Image (cartoon, rainbow, N blue to C red):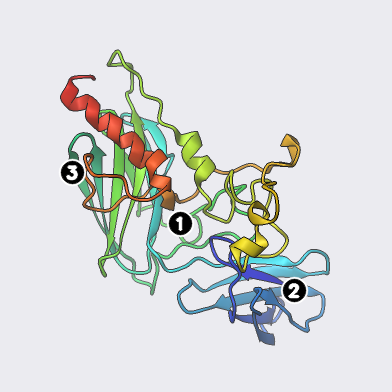
């Protein structure tokens, strides 16, 4: 029938999968995924409502047409706190929408990252009446090409807005999300001036951030051309990057699928207590947003606007 994987395109074992006839809701089969994430089911061709559930991941139901052909790629999202703002870059005064994945109530705040981290304003507590109602749903298939489209399913109430206006002062900003349990995740926001105000212009390396972002299972360095036909079980055994001679970029340019900016960026999160004068922890952080914060912070006490 298909395969089931997480947001890293890692195979998920022992996922409970239920097939219901889309016409009358009759339960047709209940199966579990194999160690390679494969889903085998003895069902006739037709339309089905498929429900997937596994501890530590958000359950969901999707409509699937069984008609042979390529196996369907089911995707589940783990219960860790994640988020991004969209658009990820704006001018002062423009608005953007924060999109947070949380399985518990969370508090959000906006900070400017200069030489000192400055609290711009708290953005309140966020929760909903339904159970785990601030949990997001990722699309199935390869959403590294199209984006994760959070805040789309079940967000139709016109009176509940998740928009925030960009501050007047330009710079690198971060939104801090803290869950009720203490879980923490921070995500960047680039704010340009509404009109030029200083003799020095800084170009944030958002293309580089995106190239290294493997959320969804692909980046410019892992599965660069496309997702493989089956999810990953062991990276060193299954990824093209590690098999024999390095061949990640062997394909012609036209064969490389796009990488959407509309994805969470775990590679750009920072510890809550991080300071601009601290050593940079981690390999990814040493050349992405955390590293760009350092020269931006250095400019301020040196008098460079």
Residue 17 found in image quarter: bottom right
Using the image as rendered, state which of residue 244 and residue 67 is in the foreground.
244
- Few, some or many residues within 10 Å of mark 1 (<14, 14–19, 20+): few
Q: Which residue is mark 3?
A: 119
Q: Nearer the viewer, mark 2 or mark 1?
A: 2
**147 left or right, relative to 192:** right
Q: Image quadrant for the C terminus?
A: top left
Mark 2 element type: loop
Q: Which residue is mark 2?
A: 1
Q: Nearer the viewer, mark 1 or mark 3?
A: 3
Using the image as rendered, state which of residue 256 and residue 48 is in the foreground.
256
The answer to whether any part of residue 215 appears in the image is: yes
User: Who comes first in sequence, dot 2 or dot 1?
Assistant: 2
Calculate the distance from the C-alpha at mark 2 to the C-alpha at mark 1: 32 Å
**88 left or right, relative to 184:** right
Using the image as rendered, state which of residue 87 and residue 177 is in the foreground.
177
User: Who comes first in sequence, dot 1 or dot 3?
Assistant: 3
- Few, some or many residues within 10 Å of mark 2 (<14, 14–19, 20+): some
Point out residue 170 in the picture as x, y percentages from the top left corner: 28, 28
Q: Which residue shows up at 28% across the image and 35% down it?
A: 294
User: Who comes first in sequence, dot 2 or dot 3?
Assistant: 2
Point out residue 59 in the picture as x, y percentages from the top left corner: 51, 74
**267 left or right, relative to 173:** right
Residue 233 found in image quarter: bottom right
Asked if 205 appears above or below 275 in the picture, the reply is: above
Mark 3 element type: strand
Q: Image quadrant for the N terminus?
A: bottom right
Asked if 122 appears above or below 196 in the picture, the reply is: below
Q: Which mark is residue 183?
A: none
Q: Which residue shows up at 51% across the image and 60% down it?
A: 153
Q: Which mark is residue 156?
A: 1
Point out residue 244 in the picture as x, y percentages from the top left corner: 70, 54
């Amino acid at each position: 029938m298909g395969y089931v994987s997480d947001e890293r395109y890692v195979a998920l074992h022992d996922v409970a999968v239920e097939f219901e006839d889309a016409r009358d809701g009759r339960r047709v089969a209940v199966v579990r995924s194999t160690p390679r994430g494969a889903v085998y089911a003895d069902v006739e061709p037709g339309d089905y409502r498929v429900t997937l559930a596994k501890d530590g991941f958000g359950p969901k139901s999707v409509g699937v047409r069984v008609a042979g052909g390529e196996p369907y790629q089911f995707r589940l999202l783990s219960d860790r706190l994640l988020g991004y703002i969209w658009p990820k870059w704006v001018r002062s005064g423009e608005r953007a929408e924060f999109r947070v994945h949380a399985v518990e109530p969370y508090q959000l705040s906006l900070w400017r990252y200069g030489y000192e981290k400055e609290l711009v304003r708290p953005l309140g507590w966020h929760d909903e009446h339904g159970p785990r109602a601030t949990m997001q749903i990722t699309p199935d298939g390869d959403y590294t090409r199209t984006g994760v489209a959070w805040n789309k399913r079940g967000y139709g109430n016109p009176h509940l807005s998740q928009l925030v206006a960009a501050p007047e002062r330009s710079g690198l900003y971060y939104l801090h999300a803290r869950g009720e349990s203490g879980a923490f995740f921070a995500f960047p926001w680039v704010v340009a001036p509404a009109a030029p105000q200083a003799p020095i212009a800084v170009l944030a390396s958002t293309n580089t951030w995106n190239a290294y972002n493997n959320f969804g299972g692909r980046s410019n360095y892992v599965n660069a051309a496309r997702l493989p036909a089956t999810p990953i079980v062991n990276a060193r055994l299954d990824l093209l990057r590690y098999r024999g001679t390095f061949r990640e970029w062997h394909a012609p340019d036209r064969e490389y699928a796009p990488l959407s900016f509309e994805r969470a960026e775990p590679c750009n999160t920072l510890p809550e207590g991080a300071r601009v004068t601290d050593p940079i922890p981690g390999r990814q952080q040493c050349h992405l947003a955390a590293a760009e914060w350092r020269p931006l912070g250095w400019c301020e006490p040196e008098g460079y606007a």
